[in-house]
Amino acid sequence: MSPTSRKRPDQNQFGITTLEDISTLILQSHDLDETLDNIVTLVARRMGTEVCSIYLLEDDGLTLRLRATRGLSRRAVGKVAMKISEGLTGLAVEQGKVVSILEPQNHPRYRYFRETREERFHSFLGIPLFDRRRPIGVLAIQTLAPRQFGGEEISALSTIAFQVSSIVVNARLLDSIRQKEEQANRFVRELEQTRQNRSHQPGEAENAARSDYRALRGTPAYPGVASGPANLLDERLGLTDIVDKADVEPRRERALLETALEKTRIQTLYLEKQMAARLSADDAAIFHTHLMILEDRGFIQKLLSAIEQRRHSAAYALKTVVSDYIEAFGRMEDAYLRERAADMEDIGRRILANLMGQSPQPLQLKNPGILVARELLPSEVASLEPEKILGIVTEMGAKHSHAVIMAKSMGIPTIVGVKGALKRVTPDENLILDANSGTLYINPPPQVAEEFRRLEADRHREIQRFEAFRDQPARTADGVEIKLRANIGLMGDVAIALRNGAEGVGLYRTEFPYMARGDFPDREEQYLLYRRIVEEFGGHPVTIRTLDIGGDKALPYFAPPQEDNPFMGWRSVRVSLDHRDIFRTQIEAVLMAGVHGPIRLLFPMISSMEDIRACKEVVAEARRHLRAAGLAAAEKLPLGIMIEVPAAVYLSERLADEVDFFALGTNDLIQYLLAADRNNPLVARYFDPLHPAVVGALGQLAQTARKHRIDLCLCGEMATEPMHMALLLGLGVREFSMAAPFIPRTKAFLSRITLGQAEKIARTALGFGESRQIREGIRKELADQGLLDI
Ligand code: PEP
Ligand code: MG
């Protein structure tokens, strides 16, 4: 086939099916090289490119080595290595972004490796691989014919690159886990030896428990220590954890079941095809059997009668029917038939997954414990009862996953990226989670358990120290009242905010409920949600921010355009103003909910007077629309803007005339003021809340708000740090919004500082021109006043 006649794949198709295949490859393989090899083969085939290669960065962080290739000489694998300062592949790492080049030989960075015989290629596409934001390698594509890669292709490949990164990271982690496990086992053996030396004869059960001791490693996501039984949240054991619903509506449950069955059938067909292509028709036959069971009238009939006659929920019906089958198969004499029990379990698990995906029913856990899951979706986390989650362990590694955001706001110790956790933990096993070091101990020996009990007790003592402040208003030592509100995203945050004594909501990130759905929620759905939240806060204001997507937040059903610089691009209110229907719908829902309690409407990313005026126009339009429809809307609803773009700081005097309040978004404001990506560890030291330019801007904003008598609430992460809090207070900020678990501690801190002391700190800070001096100056003031220990 000539290079130009090679058929290019449909791009959307490429993205979705290839991703699914890669996920399967990842799940099925435990050997890194084999997986990388499979991935390059798959991507090259699906993309219709002659070459796909993966290069990984060595431990020195400077050398890239070819680890897998389809199209280049196989002999080059493991041999070809280059510094990141050379070659186009190195360029992708150095620049930390996609490099797409036609006629690569003409590029000054081109470097030829004889082993690869790559002079024949006329286009090059290099996609960097990252572990969080640390570069770890490159996925490189080359083609014989000159080819300009489209935005969709690049975006699909970037997602694949993300997956490749996660398997590389996990494989490396696995190595360190094995080492840790060896250590842990050695420790147990030594303990055992000591005990025997003391001629103690342990009981059988005790021995068994100890020989079961394992330790798994992950990445700490939210610190803390917890212990308790394992609550597994996965498809494998989801069935056992299902409890029935009280008021079942059979018609609805039946429809849910039918959709789930249909989805499972399609997925099974797909699995069968995939298996046949990769291995053989014989290997794929097992899925054919699954399909037969899924279509079996007896099976379906049993499920339906469990719903209709016994009035079980679809999930519970599935649990009972599948359990019966499993039991029956398990009792059979014939070994082949006995194995069908595992198939039944597999099928049940897949139907259940579809049932859950179809309608996020509340996942009810039996007892408080440590939740072990592959990954948690926001809707799942939101439906869990927080008091039953003592700790969270996920197999997926994303530190910015929703699970982590939620865990943080709930203050739950969490570790992520625990490879194979679901396979290696069984329900109700004793776990100790040390989220400070990222270790999960399974069936720990008594000595380890004892040490952690002590740590846990210390943690509880610390929590209790702040407990006393929960229900008190926030006040400085000299009685100045400060408002502490909560940042929330999902419904689950509300209870946490209330429990931690938040005086309302300073920032409701409405993109979270949007992210949790399969499509844009309609007005009614949004109205009910906002109304419920404002009612829960019983008279305290709830600040609802309109959709803030783009940058690093995408909606699954609203693909963002490919942008070189998404944080500077089409994000936030810019998207809303370009999609007025979506924007107006949200504002109408907010206005309607405003009838039920004090709501404030907040617009993100305002960078000009035109922006805010356009937003106000949409508010007016929404009011007219509601009035015409005869629907009630809040008469007076305070309007505010996020100050998070430097232009808004400079325009703050004018903007103050347009709005009722400012919300100071320091997460973005700092990144834009200092040109330092808030998520990029390479520039983390530039992202500095105590940079003199930031301190100056914050001081100026506090003054502007006071002069114009409008509210100013700071809702960026910086407020959770007492040192920053002291400074902000001194600069004149009196209202803060933060992740709710930080509120009691902040109240405790405020109760020990006087306004005079804070103002002295602010004067000191404003007098310096360097961050280091500011930081040391604040620390010294706090130390002199005995306030550093909190
Ligand atoms: C901010 O930018 O400071 C902020 C609070 O908003 P977000 O973190 O949602 O961008
Ligand atoms: Mg922001």
Image (spheres, helix red, strand yellow):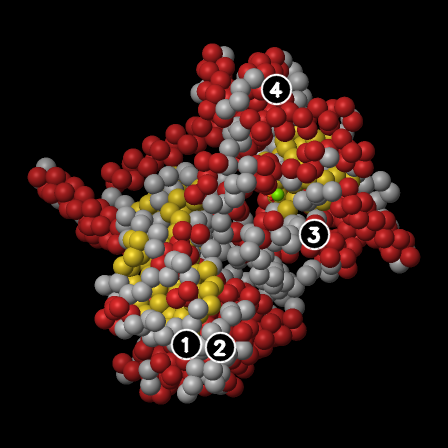
Image quadrant where residue 234 sits: bottom left
Upstream in sequence: badge 1 or badge 2: 1
Which amino acid, mark 1? Leu
Residue at figure coordinates x 50%, y 19% from the top left = 778
Q: Nearer the viewer, residue 469 or 251?
A: 469
Image quadrant where residue 255 sits: bottom right
Vertical order, 274 against 377 (above or below): below
Residue linked to disc 3: 574
Position of residue 515 measured from the top left corner of the image (x, y, whole percent): 60, 57
Residue at figure coordinates x 36%, y 74% from the top left = 120
Q: Nearer the viewer, residue 278 or 563?
A: 563
Residue linked to disc 4: 730
Upstream in sequence: badge 4 or badge 3: 3
Upstream in sequence: badge 4 or badge 1: 1
Count of numbered marks: 4
Which amino acid, mark 4? Gly
Which amino acid, mark 2? Gln
Vertical order, 463 against 641 (above or below): above
Give the spatial CA distance, label 1 vs label 2: 35 Å
